[in-house]
Every structure is written in C-alpha cells, then in structure tokens.
Amino acid sequence: MKRFSDLTEQEVLALAITNEEEDSRIYRGFAEGLREQFPASAKVFEEMAEEEVHHRTILFDLYRQKFGEYLPLIRRQDVKGFLNPKQPLWLMRPLGLDAARKFAENMEFEAERYYRKAAESARDVSVRKLLIELAEAEAGHESLAHKLTEQILTKGAREKEDATSKRMFMLQYVQPGLAGLMDGSVSTLAPLFAAAFATHNTWATFLVGMAAAVGAGISMAFAEALSDDGSLTGRGSPVIRGLVTGGMTAIGGLGHTLPYLIPHFLTATIVSFMVVAVELAVISWIRMRYMDTPFLQASFQVVVGGVLVFVAGILIGSS
C-alpha cells in the first residue's frame, strides 16, 4: 500500500477517477436495492449517481490532457492513511433506507476531504483548480440531495416510504422480539414456579429457571431463523430475526428467574411475582405501541395467558 503523501499527481487524478466511478456504482446499487419499496428515494440516488458520472468525465478529460490515455489502476484499498475501504452495504437485501442515506453522507464527506487534501499537494494550476471545484461540488451535494429530495421525494411519496419503513421495522425487529419476549415471559413461568413450590429451594429454582430461559431462547432462535429466509415476506435477515427472537426469549425468562438468587424463598417469590407483573405490562405496552392494540385489550390477552401458565406451574409444583 502507498501513503497518500507519496502519490504522484498522475496517481492522485487516477484515484479520483476510480473513486468517482465506484461512488456512482454504489449509488446505483442503493437505487436498485431501494427501488421496490422506496422508489422515490431510489430516484434520488440515481440522480446522485449521474452527478458522480459527470465528475468522472471532467476528471478523465483533464487527465488525458495531462498524462495521455493510460490510466493506472489505483483504488482506495491501495492507499493507506487517508481513505478506508467501504463495506458493501449496497449489496445487502433488504436495504435499509436510513443506513443508505447515512452511508451516502459519509461518502460525500470523504470525497470532499480527499479533493481538498489532493489540491493542497497539486503543483499544476489547472489540476489544483479542478480539485478545489470538485471539493466544493462534493460539499454542495448535501444541498443537491435536498433539492432532489424536494423535487422527487414529495410529501405523498415520503409518507408512503415512511409507512413502508415502519412496516419493515415491524416485520424484522418488533414482531420477532415481541414473540420472543412473550414466549420467554410466559412459557417459563410453569417450570419455574413448579420447581419453586415443589422444592422451596431458591438455588434449585434458579437453576431450573436458567435452564428453561436459555433452552427456550435457543429453541426460539432456531425456529424463527428457519421459518423463512425473508426473500418473499420482506422480514429481513433470518439470522438477525433469530438473534432478536432468541435474545428476547432468554431475557423474558431470566427476568423472573434472577430473583431466586435471593436466598430467602418467600422474598424471592414475591420479587419474582413483581417482575412477572412488570414483564406483562411491558408486553402489553409494546402491543399497544406497535400493534395498535388498545392497552386494556392487550393487557387482558397477555394477563390471561400468563395467569393460566402461572397457576398451572403452582398447581403442578404443589401436587
């Protein structure tokens, strides 16, 4: 790898050309990844890609005037101390709108920094002038993006895309997480309290609760991850959904298990009861907040299920 300070003027221009071409392809990758669910934002990225193509053209025209037709292959990953290789976010499917926008902002900042740094070391007046102009253009991309957004991403289009984004967040994170939390908070009640009332031993009860929570978490993680790959349902990465579901299942089970680290049985059981009440309230709030379910209705549905499992565990443990 070469240091940026060791690049020749020819290499600086060649790298700029390569960067502009790569950035335009990244923007087109964003547009392609967003086209189906966010068509208006995809159009914005297409316009940005065209702008990068224009920059490459004027850079290459100047390069040919100065150095001829031969263009050395030099890329970001060939230079250290200045530009960092980009992660292939544009290849991800489904592609998150906020992540793409943030990535694009970082790209523009990086490009502006590159042109200003290159202009400082440029000896040729025409090269320095062009590099400064390109730095200003990259700095102005924020206003360009705003202008394109106002023209293309209208209020109606933005509302539609916001609704789509909310739906994707629901499918990829909220629903798997809620399913895991409900399963962990409710299904582990029976083995936990059965062990508690059968043994009246807090440590034994804690071990049973831990086993139930961890086992349920692993089971739910695999069940969610293997349910579908997200290609047809739009539910996102099965690995992420599995981790979210499994993690929330384990958390739900551990919540009312941890109080049994208290050595006094009655105190530990009372605290565990209180934790269960908080868990059911949180589940009801999530259902109200994200599922548009009235709080009383959500509470009734969750509490009924929790109480049935809770009573079953006590009866089995007391028999």
Image: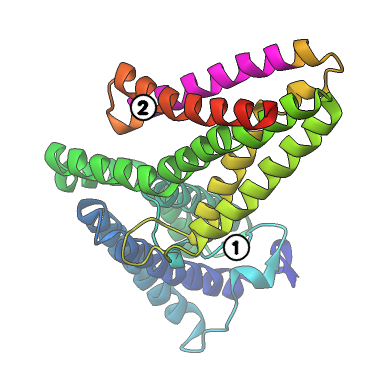
In the picture shown, does residue 148 fall above or below 24?
above
The answer to which quarter of the image holds residue 64 is: bottom left
Circle 1: residue type: Arg
Dot 1 or dot 2, earlier in sequence: 1
Image quadrant of residue 42? bottom left
Q: Position of residue 315 (x, y in %)?
A: 61, 27
How packed mark 2 is, by other alpha carbons closer than 10 Å (few <14, some 14-19, many 20 or more), is few
Q: Which residue is mark 2?
A: 301
Quarter location, residue 300: top left
Choose between 212 and 81: the one closer to the eye.
212
Residue 212 in the image, given as x and y percentages of width and height: 68, 42
Residue 81 visible in image:
yes
Residue at figure coordinates x 52%, y 40% from the top left: 183
Q: Main secondary structure of the magenta part?
A: helix
Of badges 1 and 2, nearer the viewer stands 2
Q: Which residues are magenta?
A: 269-289
Q: Is 275 in the magenta?
A: yes
Q: Nearer the viewer, residue 8 or 280?
A: 280
Label 2: element kind: helix
Viewer-side residue, 80 vs 198:
198
Q: Is residue 69 above or below residue 87?
A: below
Q: Amino acid at mark 2?
A: Gln
Q: Is residue 124 magenta?
A: no
| Image quadrant occupied by the N terminus | bottom right
Q: Is residue 106 left or right of residue 51?
A: right
> Which residue lies under the disc numbered 1?
123
